[in-house]
Image (cartoon, rainbow, N blue to C red):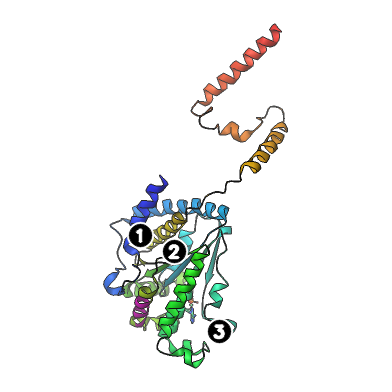
Amino acid sequence: MADDRAERIAGFIAPLRVKPGSKVRLDRDFDPRYKAGLKKQEGIELLRTGVSLLAEYQERLAAQDTFGVLLCLQALDAGGKDGTIRHVMSGVNPQGVSVSSFKVPSSEELDHDYLWRYARRLPGRGEIGIFNRSHYEEVLVVRVHPEVLARQKLPGEQCGPDLWERRYREINRWERYLTDNGFKVVKIFLNLSKEEQRTRFLKRIDLPEKNWKFSAADVRERRHWDEYQEAFSEMLSATSTKWAPWYVVPADRKWFARICAAAVLAHTLMDIAPRFPDVGEEARKELLVTRRELAQEAPAGVPADPYTAGHPPAGRSGGRSGGRRKKERKGRKGRKGKKGKRG
Ligand code: ATP
Ligand code: MG
């Protein structure tokens, strides 16, 4: 059953995965309106399934406490990062998830190497960490805006034309290091079309309750659309690796983007296949001693173990109807009663 689900999810996300080593050109290779032939209603059902699957796997990940997952989310403004996080993580235990948003770096952050601030927000073992924007800004906004790079105070000789290739290499190695140490890295780019961005910006202006989401800076960034597409294409080509792949998620339909994001995360967790820890023979024996003690504390008229009374183990009383069990108990009592009289 689990294998069946894993296979279906893997098939669903396969077209979104950037093949390591391939050369991506966003406008040619990925359609922001793709929806895998799904209708919205089917999509909503699927998302519900995905969300409960995530909850199930997150519990195991936390219990096993060996692996962590880092999900990096990148998008242009109005790409839907916030809504995706809200919906995809709606079923998981908040104690096992951390979301870190990365904005313009502070002066303290600029006083360190460029990966410093991201390393400080990595998830621990058993946790899912989400980066809302991530270290990839360092080869996106920093590349599109030379003045942003100038603020990074790099030694002059480090700013040559091979800077971006070097950063790709450093990022790949960093992600490899994390993977080797038990932290799975998976990356999603929400691929929005220019026209859909225009529509979403207008909606933010037209609806007073959305006004707070609109920023004039977003429209200024939009003027660099082509440079961003170029920077994204190069970044996807250079940093989708076997150990930390990129998925380009079609983002013009929010409901579809959310299913894809849930599926990518579910696939990552299923690949780890976290298991509830087996406490071992000795600890199990101790548990059974404690169980006997607790059972003896049962007040009169209450089952010794209310849990097993409600959940008969399969194979013993499993399969018998409640009515039949009741009759059997009555029968035993009856026989005991008679025996007592006879004796
Ligand atoms: P939202 O607008 O939905 O609240 P957001 O992620 O767009 O979310 P903003 O505060 O609007 O958040 O923007 C964050 C800004 O910080 C973006 O313009 C982004 O390019 C910029 N930024 C992120 N990382 C860096 C960086 N390393 N150097 C410079 N600018 C960065
Ligand atoms: Mg913004």
- Compared with 164, 248 (above or below) is above
Q: CA distance from mark 1 to mark 3?
A: 37 Å
Which residue appears at 55% of the width and 77% of the height? 116
The part of the image, by quadrant, that contains residue 194 is bottom left
Residue assigned mark 2: 84
Is 172 on the left or on the right of 234, as rendered? right
Numbered disc 1: secondary structure? helix
Counting from the top left corner in percent of width and height, residue 273 is at: 47, 53
Question: Which callout, 2 or 1, points at the residue further toward the start of the chain?
Answer: 1
Q: Nearer the viewer, mark 3 or mark 2?
A: 3
Which residue appears at 31% of the width and 62% of the height? 15
- Compared with 60, 104 (above or below) is below
Q: Nearer the viewer, mark 2 or mark 1?
A: 1
Q: Which residues are magenta?
A: 227-234
> Which quadrant of the figure contains the N terminus?
top left
Which residue appears at 53% of the width and 69% of the height? 100
Q: Is residue 250 visible?
A: no
Counting from the top left corner in percent of width and height, residue 11 is at: 33, 56
Question: Which callout, 3 or 2, points at the residue further toward the start of the chain?
Answer: 2
Discs 3, 2 touching: Cβ within 8 Å? no
Q: CA distance from mark 2 to mark 1?
A: 16 Å
Neighbourhood count class around disc 2 (C-alpha, 10 Å): few under 14, some 14–19, many 20 upward? many
Residue assigned mark 1: 13
Q: Nearer the viewer, residue 284 or 316?
A: 284
Numbered disc 2: secondary structure? helix
Counting from the top left corner in percent of width and height, residue 182 is at: 52, 62
Amino acid on which the number 1 mark rests in the picture: Ile
